[in-house]
Every structure is written in C-alpha cells, then in structure tokens.
Amino acid sequence: MKLLIGNGTSTTAIKKPKKRPFKELTDRELIQLESEIGAKLFGPVKPGCRREFFNEDPKNWIWYEEWVGPDKKTHSITTRYEVHDNGILKVQEGKPYVYIKGKELENLSIAVQKYYENIMRDIYKRDHKTGEPIN
Amino acid sequence: MSEQNQGIYQIPHANNGVFDDVENKNTLNAVYEVYNENITPSEELKKTELLNPNFNHDVIDIALHQTNSKNIISFEKFKEEKQLNSEIDDIYSQNIIEKRIFDPSEELLNLSESDKINYYPIKDIGPLILRERERIKSGNIKIPGYLEKDDKKLKSAA
C-alpha cells in the first residue's frame, strides 16, 4: 500500500506512463489511474492536500488523505475498508476496528459504485452495467 | 428468520409463471440474475442450494418459465411471452448491482436491511475491477482512445 500511496512528498500522484500500448500497464499503474478518478469523487482537494481513493484488491478499499495542519506539518490518515463476509470493516491506525453501518456504509457504497462506473467509462472503456465495450 | 429477512424466500408464488406481484423486486432480482448472467438455471440452483438448502425453488421455476426446458431463453423473450408490464422495464433498467440475488449468507450479517443493500455493491465490485485489470494485462485487449487522446493533446500543445 505504501507504494501506491507514496511517502507524501510527491506533488503529483499520477504519472501516466509514456510507454505504448496501454496494455503494458502494471497493476500498480492501473490502480494509480483509477485512484486519480477515485479522488475526484469527493469534491475538490484543497491546495496542499492530497487524496487517494482506490480499490487495492477485491477485498480492500483505500482512502488516503494528506493535509498540512496549523502546525505547518504534513498530516495524513489512511483508512482501509476491508470486505468481509459479515460486513465492511473500517481499519485506521490507532483506532478500534469497526464494522461500518448506516450513513457511512451508504456513502462508501455510493462512492464505490461511482468509482466503478467512472473507471469503466474513462479507463476501461466499457459499460459498467453490461461490461460491453463502449463504441 | 424473520419474515422481513427472508427476502427471496418469501416471494409470492407465481401462478403459471406469471408474477402475482410484479413489484416484488426480490423476485425480479432473482429472475434477472438467472437470465442476465447467462448461467443455466441448474447451475444457479446448484449454487443457491449450496448456500442455503432452504432456498425457495419457486425462483428457479419462474426462471425456467415453466417450459420444462433447461435451455435459457432471453429476458426479452421472457417479457414478450409473459406480457409483463412496464414496471419490469423500469426495474430492469436500473443498475445491475441492485439486482443481485440476496446471498442467503446475509443472515450472518448483523446489518439492517438498508445496510445490506449498501453492503453488496461494495462486496461485488472489487472482483469486477480485478477482472478488468486482468483483461488488460492479458495483452489481448487494448483500451482504445485513452492514451491516444493524451498523445493528441501533447502534440497540439507542442
């Protein structure tokens, strides 16, 4: 996950590879492209802040936020949403793990569905409902 | 198991293959899945039985359209034959993710009904994304337009 999120010092999260064709992209590069779209789902990011939101693998969704606090120091928080058979477990460092419910679960669900819809359209060029190629 | 939690297991019985209650979304979900995922009812039945031996076989009966045939017929043909009204079209046109069969294992979830509805898209979409990534990496399929568009932008900028 560290590789995907970076160390917080980079100014640009996504660098589209110059190599062609696109099919040579690795998982990591595809995830970076997806995260570029995922980050936009939650509105604009303030200057000096950074956001990533992406599907790491079938069982994990990652939300990363980075900002500069009043103390002029860079802060960050990584939230991992783990898909379990009995619910979605929210994992944050230093906090109790909890299964999310109610509005938080609804918001995540909407975000995940929009993420899927957008990456299918903008990256994979497929209809998110049917999986068929978009002409 | 409360009546509310029984989901598709409490669908109204279909008389002669016609829905008694076309607004019963769970029933439609089940039929939609059987047809739209293009899997044979027998496979669906097997899968469902593995998950819950108490599964209501009415769902499969509906999906089979009481044709006594094991062949899949298209949903369009199904609608045509049964003259289902536009309410089904409305539901059919909604997001596929909303149309999943409720997994019987949901009874294990300590979630409200609305939470369960929000849970399943999250559970389902991860594997779909993995499939897309694998499709690209397989090397057989190109993504048209994406980087080519970037190239055009770069050239025009230059």
Image: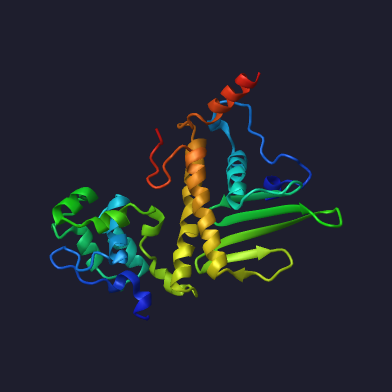
Give coordinates of residue B97: x percent, y percent: 41, 55
In the image, what residue occupies the spot 61% across and 39% down? A29
Examine the image and state in which quarter residue A27 appears.
top right
**Count the marks: how many?**
0
Say whether residue A74 is left or right of residue A127.
right
Examine the image and state in which quarter residue B141 appears.
top left
Asked whether B140 or A29 is in front, the reply is A29
Asked whether A26 or B49 is in front, the reply is A26
Give coordinates of residue B16: x percent, y percent: 13, 65
Say whether residue A15 is left or right of residue B117.
right
Q: Can residue A88 be seen in this view?
A: no
Q: In this view, does B125 lie above or below B46?
A: above
Say whether residue B24 is left or right of residue B139.
left
Type of colouring: rainbow
Give coordinates of residue B115: x percent, y percent: 48, 69
Q: Is residue B149 visible?
A: yes
Give coordinates of residue A69: x percent, y percent: 81, 56
Q: Is residue A107 above or below residue B153?
A: below
Viewport quadrant of the C terminus of chain A: top left
In the image, what residue occupies the spot 51% across and 59% down? A109
In the image, what residue occupies the spot 70% across and 45% down? A3
Residue that lies at the very extreme toward the right in this rendered image: A71
Q: In this view, does B78 lie above or below B25?
A: above
